[in-house]
Image (spheres, rainbow, N blue to C red):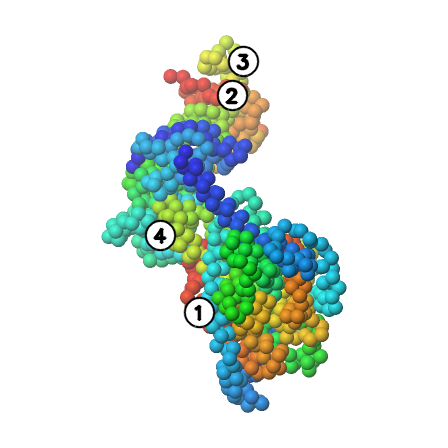
Amino acid sequence: MTQNRSWIPYLLILPTVFFLGLLFIAPLVQTIWLAVSDNGMPSLANMRTMMIDINFGRSILNTFLLTLVVVPVQIAMALAMGTMVSKVNGGRETILWIWTIPLGISDLAAGMVWLSILQNTGYLNTLLFSMGLIERQTAWLTYQTPVALFVGIAVAEIWRGTAIVMIIIVAGLNQVPKEFKEAAEIFGASPWTRFTRITLPLIRPALQSALILRTVLAFEVFAVVYALGGRNFPVLVGEAYNWQNQNQNYSVAAAYAVLIMVISLIATLFYLKVIKVDPERLP
Amino acid sequence: MSNTSFISARRLLLWSGIVALCAWVLVPIYLVALGALGGRSGVYQWPKSILPTGVSLQPFFLFLKTEGVVQSFLNSLGAAGITVALSILLGAPAGYALARYNFRGKDSFRILVLLTRAFPLAILALPLTVSFIRLGLYDTVIGVGLIHTVLALPFAALVTQGIFLGVPRELEEAAWVFGCTRIQAFFKIVAPLALPGLVATAVFAFVISWNEVFAASVLTVRNRTLTAYLLTVLSESPMHYRFAGGLLLILPSVVFIFAVRRYLFAIWGISSK
Amino acid sequence: MANIVIDSIRKDFGTFQALKEVSLTINDGEFVSLLGPSGCGKTTLLRIIAGLETGTSGDISVDGRSIVGLPPKDRGLAMVFQNYAVFPHMTVYENVAFGLRMQKADEARVKKQVEKAAALLHIEPNLGRYPNKLSGGQRQRVAVARALAVEPRVLLMDEPLSNLDALLRLEMRTELKTVLQAAGTTTIYVTHDQTEAMGLSDRIAVVHDGRIEQVGTPVEVYNHPATRFVGSFIGNPPMNFISMPVTAGHVAIGTKRFAVPAGSGDTILLGLRGETVERAPHGQGLEMQVRVAEPMGSHLLLTGSILGQAARVILPATETVRNGEMIGLTLDAKRLTWLSPDSGISYPAAA
């Protein structure tokens, strides 16, 4: 049936291949070339410019710290949410809907939401004031308060980005038959053992894709940082943006882009290697 | 007896956790809405009240009347519309091919699609600036829509694959047997059954475009999308305008997510495989 | 090994009563089936015994000690699930060892027990493999081995054969019986398949609408069903029920008169097993209007009506009957069941 019409699938995927070739592969190659060339000649000048910039080290450090804090917290929260909601019968739908609302919220909007809480006359200060912990309005988002600024950005990122992790994890949990947990319970496994020895290994694929997705997104963090801290908290994508739009230096911006891509790719490969997904060992 | 109180203590703990997490999501949205509707005086009120006092729609309308807001809102809608149209029109056929055919190069194609996930795609807007200027796409809604389609298309192809796999092949074969051509069978049998899933996919494509900040900011100067506009005027706008902008960004997405809430888990179950 | 006393267990789901005060005693080493149609409450009862669900009221004790409120792990039991629930991310060995390792048994004992259970179920060659490589029947064996490896006081089985194809089911049924007899473990076995229950059990508890309708050996339950439901659920073809007029404590069938139990009213329900009849010469015995005669090879299956009521009987394969023929049947008084037409409950069998 399909042999004599073997051109059909190619016809169907052709537009996508063409489009991705033009707007994904081509710019990818272009970015790399832009980053490692100078006036049409291979050169590491842009890399050098990037690396000697005073914000370079800080932006790398900030981005990594943010990723290292935000991603594990999001995974842990998502697992807790998934476990909680699996114990609920009535109202499950509503709870899940509320928890997924941040999925529709952009990082810029998330930044503004938390700005309304963390700004000088905001709700955090009001709360601390009413509890008698502070005596006057306190600034949290300046470069004199790097730790508070970092915490604020991390909280905003966790607030916004946990929904997608939760959805992937809950979808993964839904695919684990409840008999596995019951069998483990009958044979004497404690709730914690059931979670670590049965549930976690069985949702490996979901964990893997959640980690890859969230980590790549975490390295892309930009607007939420910009909304809360302006340029007080340099991150990699923010630097790329500044080089492109403020300094009009596309090559250094491309160097940053390549750096971010390399980091993302390494992270992805790392997850693929560490969290092995063997279809033989899944339900 | 002690057993039941133990159980109810656990239930109490469970529900406190659930309520706390719901509040964690909802309270900040409520607070930014207060900020958006409280106006200038609301921003400087100290200490703040948690109750909606002094709230009116006036400050929000004032914000909407600010120069550039309505235009950028429309631009965002336009870019999102292009993203939806392109990612469904291109992605659904690819998803169908993945679901129904075995062909040489299928795995390579899947890898190409999955590869996009390992890259921060929005960053690819950087080199595109030059080509877009040359092609006259720079600073246009179409240009932004194109780059947003790169973000949404792989997602759409993978999700529609799952959707089409969910329509039993036998139904389509039955249609062929009863005299439909392949194209008729697709539109009479498969498309209606796949429609809800396709709509949900379209909504996600919309949200992806609507929320994207970086590429939109890089590729536009005057024809800004709402996110790009807000990002550029951020530092010089007063606080209550920023909150109003945040609220304006949040509202459509939340409505859309509500509309497709039933499909969220099915879709992510599929796309995370 | 242990004896189990189930005392007035009740389970409500909202307003729906899944179990209505069920009581049952299971002796040490006995194999008891809970047999009933889907939704009758048999699986709920099993899950309450396992501790996976909590009864609304009532008590369950094992060896005289109540286990209500204990978590499953402290009940000393093992279970085989309908879909096996063999962990896909562990090897067969790790699966069989799971329960022992949870009990923190030392590895020497784990190894000994795993090898013993594996030998019993002939899965030694598969110990190093992952379950997804195995067929349904092999996975079934792993599930049973995992349960037996912990030497449970009580073994619970929830429709363990229902996911196997017909041929394999028959094979596993025979094998299960051999294995469990060797192990001598007290077993509660849930099934909707009457032939499984008949073949495996020491005793059968027939469950219907959240109640146990009858408990007895397979032969008792088959020959003397306590209720109309039991008679119709067990046996293939099911028992025939024919309503008959009673005159002066007797029922007239053909030329014979059968005494009916005292206390019956004007009519009585005759429970007739299809294979207990013999063909009578024409004009004698109970008349049956045959609609369809189906030669089955081993026997002849007749479908039609007796006294205007639907009936199915079985004659030896040597008989020949045409479709539409009227035949006479001779009944064996000792193998008849008499039931009240109102309550559907049978009268005690005459001594």
The quadrant in which residue C195 appears is top left
- Residue B80 bears which disc, if any? none
Q: Which residue is mark 3?
A: C266
The answer to whether residue B97 is seen in the rendering is no
Mark 4–mark 2 distance (CA, rounded to whole Å): 49 Å
Instruction: Please give the chain letter of the residue carrying mark 2.
Output: C
Q: Camera-side residue: B241 or C175?
A: B241
Q: Camera-side residue: B108 or A97?
A: A97
Q: Is residue B195 above or below residue B217?
A: above
Q: Are marks 3 and 2 on the same chain?
A: yes
Mark 1–mark 4 distance (CA, rounded to whole Å): 29 Å
Mark 3–mark 1 distance (CA, rounded to whole Å): 84 Å
Q: Amino acid at mark 4?
A: Asn
Where's the N terminus of chain C, which quadrant? Answer: top left
Q: Nearer the viewer, mark 3 or mark 1?
A: 1
Q: Residues within 10 Å of mark 1 (few under 14, many from 20)?
A: few
Q: Which residue is mark 1?
A: A270
Which residue corresponds to the image point at 74% horizontal and 61% vertical from the top-left? B62
- Residue C343 bears which disc, if any? 2
Q: Is residue B145 above or below residue C129?
A: below
